[in-house]
Image (tube, rainbow, N blue to C red):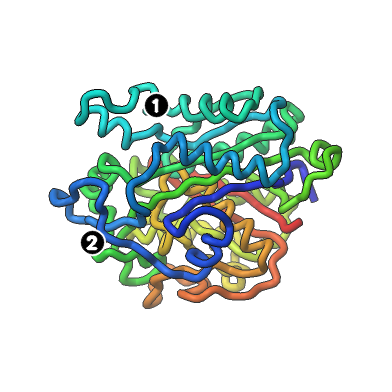
């Protein structure tokens, strides 16, 4: 088994608050808190709800706060050649305000690469810096690239972060595409699912090579043993109906991990008509008959869809599942769909003996990522 990449720190924020305990209470507790949006006028939209926590701080501050928490948890010494990789589309909320208010935030803050540069400079980290903007796999792509850098010996440490705060531009886009639930609830994999809702979220993880972690006596939280990425390029917005790209990404990750059995899958699970059956089909392609025995859940039923932050926040959720031996539930599940026929851990958390878990994400344009985590 490869242990090329170790996890030694993380910081996370969702609608439930900051830190691991907030995730345990809200996400693992399966308690949706979708509510009417108050930070901008929603009167012109069909969907008016999201998983938001009041008026947000600027995205750069939220990212810095969670990145600082990850570095502190890891006990990483100040400075050093740590890569900084961020999944972000820039601060769209800032862009909107800029056009509406004279003297608003600087346009520079809306540039995605600016987020990585700010994090690195404020934390005194001097390694490579890169921003990933490939939508809902952006922060998962940042983690994947960091794993490649560490496994290849190009860096010994990497800080991977991602953030999204609900704003009007993306709400308008998803609303016009009829992708949002008009019922104020999200029901992944359920027959009566009606779409997604957006949510606030940000997280950061500190990854290290085993040698570096050992030299400094770091506490190891888990390992990333496999990673994969693939594109099916089937449609600009819809996934391949058989989950072809997802299956390829997962197969890559499992090969990298040595083909070890998977005890849990944290699914992308957007609760949209096309995504959920395609994802189910892709997982069945990979696991075959064993798919019936692998629990799968989507945490978007409580967090909402975190767009560019999805990968890294769900990475932390998966890590906590391994650390605690608890499966997060698919909240909002009501009735089975013949096209979605896996064990979706409906509505309640479940104790389980977990050794290895898989977390997957997908994005418009057919992009797919897969990461295998192992308990320390």
19 or 241, which is in the foreground?
19
Mark 2 — residue?
A: 182
Query: Where does residue 78 sit, x and y in percent of width and height?
Result: 70, 30
Secondary element at image label 1: helix
* Image position of 156 with respect to 44: above or below: above
Q: Residue at x 76, y 29 (%)?
A: 153
118 or 171, which is in the foreground?
118
Q: Residue at x 33, y 23 (%)?
A: 107
Query: Is the Cβ of the residue at disc 2 closer than 8 Å to that at disc 1?
Result: no
* Image position of 145 with respect to 168: above or below: above
* Image position of 173 with respect to 287: above or below: above
139 or 221, which is in the foreground?
221
**Res 339 seen here:** no
24 or 229, which is in the foreground?
24
Query: Where does residue 310 sit, x and y in percent of width and height?
Result: 47, 48
Q: Mark 2, mark 1: which one is toward the viewer?
A: 1
Query: Quadrant of the image for the C terminus?
Result: bottom right
How busy is the neighbourhood of tag 2: few (under 14 within 10 Å), some, or many (20 plus)? some
> Which label was assigned to residue 109?
1
Residue farthest toward the front in the current orientation of the protein = 103
Residue farthest toward the right in the current orientation of the protein = 215
Counting labels gives 2
Q: Earlier in the sequence, mark 2 or mark 1?
A: 1
Secondary element at image label 2: loop
Query: Where does residue 27 sit, x and y in percent of width and height?
Result: 49, 64
């Amino acid at each position: 088994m490869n242990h090329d990449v170790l996890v030694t720190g993380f910081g996370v924020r969702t609608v439930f608050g900051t830190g691991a305990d907030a995730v345990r209470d809200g996400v693992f507790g399966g308690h949706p808190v979708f509510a009417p949006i108050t930070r901008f006028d929603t009167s012109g939209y069909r969907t008016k709800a999201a998983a938001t926590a009041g008026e947000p701080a600027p995205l750069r501050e939220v990212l810095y706060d969670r990145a600082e928490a990850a570095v502190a948890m890891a006990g990483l010494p100040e400075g050093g050649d740590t890569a900084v990789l961020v999944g972000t589309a820039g601060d769209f909320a800032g862009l909107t305000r800029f056009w509406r208010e004279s003297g608003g935030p600087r346009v520079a803050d809306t540039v995605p690469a600016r987020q990585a540069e700010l994090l690195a400079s404020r934390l005194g980290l001097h390694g490579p810096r890169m921003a990933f903007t490939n939508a809902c796999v952006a922060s998962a792509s940042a983690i994947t690239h960091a794993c490649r850098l560490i496994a290849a010996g190009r860096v010994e440490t990497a800080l991977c972060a991602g953030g999204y705060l609900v704003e009007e531009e993306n709400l308008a886009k998803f609303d016009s595409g009829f992708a949002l639930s008009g019922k104020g609830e999200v029901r992944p994999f359920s027959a009566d699912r009606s779409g997604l809702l957006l949510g606030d979220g940000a997280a950061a993880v500190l990854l290290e090579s085993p040698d570096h972690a050992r030299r400094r006596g770091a506490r190891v939280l888990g390992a990333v043993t496999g990673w994969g990425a693939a594109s099916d390029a089937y449609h600009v917005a819809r996934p391949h109906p058989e989950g072809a790209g997802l299956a390829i990404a997962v197969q890559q990750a499992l090969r990298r991990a040595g083909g070890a059995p998977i005890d849990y899958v944290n699914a992308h699970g957007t609760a949209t008509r096309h995504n959920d059956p395609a994802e189910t089909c892709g997982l069945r392609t990979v696991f075959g008959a064993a798919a019936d025995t692998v629990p799968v859940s989507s945490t978007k039923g409580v967090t909402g869809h975190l767009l560019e932050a999805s990968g890294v926040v769900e990475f932390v959720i998966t890590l906590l599942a391994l650390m605690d031996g608890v499966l997060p539930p698919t909240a909002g599940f009501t009735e089975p769909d013949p096209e979605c026929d896996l064990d979706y851990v409906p509505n309640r958390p479940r104790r389980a003996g977990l050794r290895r878990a898989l977390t997957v994400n997908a994005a418009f344009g057919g992009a797919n990522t897969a990461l295998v985590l192992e308990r320390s």
